[in-house]
Structures are given as structure tokens and as C-alpha cells.
Image: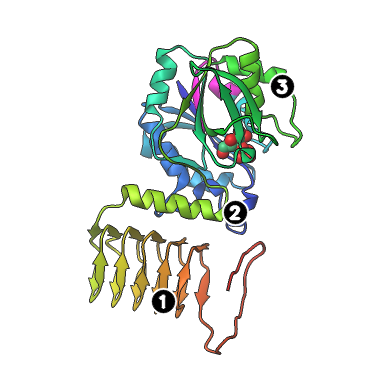
């Protein structure tokens, strides 16, 4: 069995961060989302991994995954124009050959690994196993309908009138029969070859297509608030108390990881939180669910429920919450009362 990880796309809803960073590489708890996906693939024992990349961000993704040795993988990078998930499978066909594979979206994270799904797929000798999760907003996703035995009977991509609330979460297991189904489908209204249509075609052709419902959380990190939620979930589940960094005259409460090259001075840090390498927190309060990226500085400020990427400066800011701040950005308070001075990039959002 092989794995196919989709790390392409334009990430338009996460601009301006995605002007300089692939959306799959935006960190949560100071680690790129793609890293969590690759960790879950490693747990299955799969060692041959294809990574789909987009022209704009392929350099970024290659720099992070490298030769895959960190995960024990052999990696093939497969460039693709963003023409749909089924188009990605078609593009990867020379890599996939006749093998079964698990396909994972590189910007989706779940609280559960995929090992059990791989085992079920193999044990039951399926042609497709599609992982689903109940959602409140079915019109945003691919939606599946099941019979009482868990066989998929119908799938619709972003239905205007949803026939249920079971969303396709971005983890799919396929036999090589998927390639035959893809040859039968046409691009959708959004001009993409939809994997949802290809799975429907597998159902129509009488192949064994089953579903499994995820019984933990799932986040599709397409927007700022999803990144903050994913950060909170991951910090909640994975962060351990480890305050090896340089801590002076400070209160560190709960599960806080401070990198051994970080410095916390005259401050309070309340977990769950991570403070990255060479970061500095001085005369500040860092509240729960915050990740401070490598080389970032928080000085005379109050920060909560936020993600700072690398080399950010937050200085003299009374209270900053629910914020996602990109690399090398600076947020400081103007010395002139009630004046707001901005120098921000295209597609930035400021709420004062
Ligand atoms: C894609 C799939 C959709 C699925 C979603 C999960 O949507 O087409 O069926 O529910 O991923 O994240 P897209 O992100 O391309 O809009």
C-alpha cells in the first residue's frame, strides 16, 4: 500500500500567509500541519509516499519534507495544476501503479490516526473506504449517504440541499479501481475533477465502497479560525510540561513547553502553550492556547488564543486575542494615543 498526500492548492482563504507559505505548512503548536498528516501515515507502516505539489509552493513543501527520511519514507514529489482531487490521483497514476493507496489532504487534521482504517480496508478487501464526520454546515463539503451496513449509496459535492450531515473529511482509501472510475467523470461546475464524483462512479460500477465515521475531532484548516481551533486542539492533546528554557522571575502554569533556547522573563505563561526556539517573552502574559514561533518576541504585552509564526514582534500591546500573525510581522502600540498606524500586506485583516 502507498500513500498520496495532497499538498497543492492556492490557499486563497489564508492569504496573506499563503503568499509566502504553502497552506499545509502553516504551523499549529509550532509544527506544520503537514507534519501531523505524515506522522499519521508513518503509524500505518506505509513507506512509499507521493506528495502532490502546486507550482507556487513546491519549493516550500520540498524543503520541509526533504527526502522523507525523518519519517522513514521514500518520497516522490508530483507537481500538479490545481484541477481537483481526482485530477491529482490521475496525475499520480504513474507513481501509484496498480497499488492500493490512502489519500490524505495535507491541510486536514484529526484527533485519530489512520492505522485502523488501513486495517479495515485490507481486511474487508474493499475498493474504497471513505472517512466521514457529522458536520453542522454540510453545504461546505462533500456529503455521503449510507445504507444500514455502512455501504455508500450516494455522494454529492457541496450540495445546495444536503441529504444528510455526513461530510467527507479528506482521508480516502482506494484500490486501483479508482483509476477506471476517474476515466468516466467530467469536470464539475467549478472546473475540477471531483473525487466525490469518482467515488460515486465506483458505487455505480458496483465496486465495494464503504464508509467509516470518525469518532473524534476533525479540522479542515482552510481559514484563520480553523488554524486557531486546530492549534487549540493539538495543544490540548499533545503539549507536555517541559520548561527547559531560560525562565527568570516568571510564573509558568500548567502544560507549557518552553524550548531550551527560549527565554521567559518577568512574565506569566498559562498553558497549554508552546514557546519556540530563541523566542523571548518579557514583562508579558501569555494565555492558554497560544503558540509563539521560533525567534518571536512578546514584550510588555498580553497574548491569548493566538498563533505567532516565526520572527514576530509583539510589543506594548495591551491585549491581543484570536490572532494569527505571519512570519516577520510586527504588532506594536503607537505612542500617540488613539492613533492606529498600519503597514500591512494584501488580503490582511485588522480588527481594532
Ligand atoms: C474537498 C472535497 C470535499 C471534502 C473536503 C474536505 O473540498 O472536494 O468533498 O469534504 O475537501 O476538506 P475542497 O477543499 O476542495 O473544497
Where is residue 86? Give x, y as percent.
64, 28
Q: In this rendering, is residue 26 above or below 266? A: above
Q: In this rendering, is residue 96 above or below 295? A: above
Q: Which residue does the image show at 37% across and 36% down from the upper left?
A: 71
Q: Is residue 241 visible?
A: yes
Residue 146 lies in what quarter of the image?
top right
Where is residue 41? Give x, y as percent.
41, 32
Instruction: Tell me how many marks there are.
Output: 3
Dot 3 lies on which element? loop
Does residue 207 appear left or right of residue 3 in this picture? Answer: right
Residue 185 - label: 3
Q: Which residues are magenta?
A: 93-104
Q: CA distance from mark 2 to mark 1?
A: 25 Å
Q: Is mark 1 within 8 Å of ligand 1?
A: no
Where is residue 61? Give x, y as percent.
52, 44
Quickly name the residue at label 2. 14
Residue nearest the observer in this picture, 168 or 342 = 168
**Of the residues under marks 2 and 3, which one precedes in the sequence?**
2
Where is residue 265? Give x, y as percent.
29, 75
Quarter holding the N terminus is: top left
Magenta stretch contains residue 283: no
Does residue 151 appear left or right of residue 276 in this picture? Answer: right
**Of the residues under marks 2 and 1, which one precedes in the sequence?**
2
Quickly name the residue at label 1. 301
Amino acid at each position: 500500500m502507498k500513500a498520496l498526500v495532497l499538498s497543492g492548492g492556492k490557499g486563497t482563504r489564508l492569504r496573506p500567509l499563503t503568499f509566502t507559505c504553502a497552506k499545509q505548512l502553516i504551523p499549529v503548536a509550532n509544527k506544520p500541519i503537514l507534519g501531523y498528516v505524515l506522522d499519521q501515515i508513518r503509524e500505518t507502516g506505509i513507506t512509499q509516499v507521493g506528495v502532490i505539489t502546486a507550482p507556487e509552493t513546491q519549493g516550500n513543501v520540498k524543503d520541509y519534507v526533504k527526502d522523507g527520511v525523518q519519517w522513514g519514507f521514500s518520497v516522490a514529489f508530483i507537481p500538479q495544476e490545481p484541477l481537483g482531487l481526482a485530477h491529482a490521483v490521475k496525475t499520480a497514476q504513474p507513481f501509484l501503479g496498480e497499488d492500493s493507496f490512502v489519500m490524505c489532504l495535507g491541510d486536514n487534521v484529526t484527533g485519530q490516526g489512520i492505522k485502523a482504517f488501513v486495517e479495515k480496508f485490507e481486511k474487508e478487501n474493499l475498493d474504497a473506504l471513505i472517512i466521514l464526520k457529522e458536520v453542522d454546515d454540510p453545504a461546505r463539503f462533500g456529503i455521503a449517504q449510507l445504507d444500514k451496513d455502512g455501504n455508500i449509496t450516494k455522494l454529492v459535492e457541496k450540495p445546495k440541499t444536503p441529504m444528510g450531515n455526513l461530510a467527507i473529511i479528506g482521508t480516502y482509501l482506494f484500490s486501483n479501481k479508482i483509476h477506471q472510475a476517474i476515466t468516466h467523470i467530467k469536470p464539475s461546475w467549478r472546473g475540477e475533477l471531483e473525487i466525490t464524483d469518482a467515488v460515486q462512479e465506483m458505487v455505480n460500477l458496483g465496486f465495494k465502497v464503504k464508509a467509516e465515521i470518525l469518532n473524534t475531532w476533525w479540522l479542515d484548516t482552510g481559514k484563520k479560525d480553523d488554524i486557531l481551533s486546530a492549534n487549540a486542539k493539538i495543544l490540548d492533546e499533545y503539549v507536555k510540561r517541559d520548561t527547559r528554557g531560560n525562565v527568570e522571575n516568571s510564573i509558568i502554569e500548567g502544560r507549557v513547553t518552553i524550548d531550551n533556547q527560549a527565554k521567559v522573563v518577568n512574565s506569566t505563561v498559562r498553558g497549554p502553550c508552546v514557546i519556540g526556539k530563541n523566542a523571548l517573552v518579557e514583562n508579558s502574559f501569555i494565555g492558554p492556547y497560544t503558540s509563539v514561533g521560533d525567534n518571536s518576541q512578546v514584550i510588555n504585552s498580553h497574548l491569548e488564543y493566538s498563533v505567532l509564526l516565526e520572527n514576530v514582534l509583539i510589543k506594548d500591546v495591551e491585549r491581543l486575542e484570536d490572532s494569527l500573525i505571519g512570519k516577520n510581522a510586527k504588532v506594536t502600540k503607537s505612542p500617540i494615543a488613539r492613533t492606529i498606524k498600519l503597514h500591512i500586506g494584501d488580503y490582511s485583516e485588522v480588527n481594532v
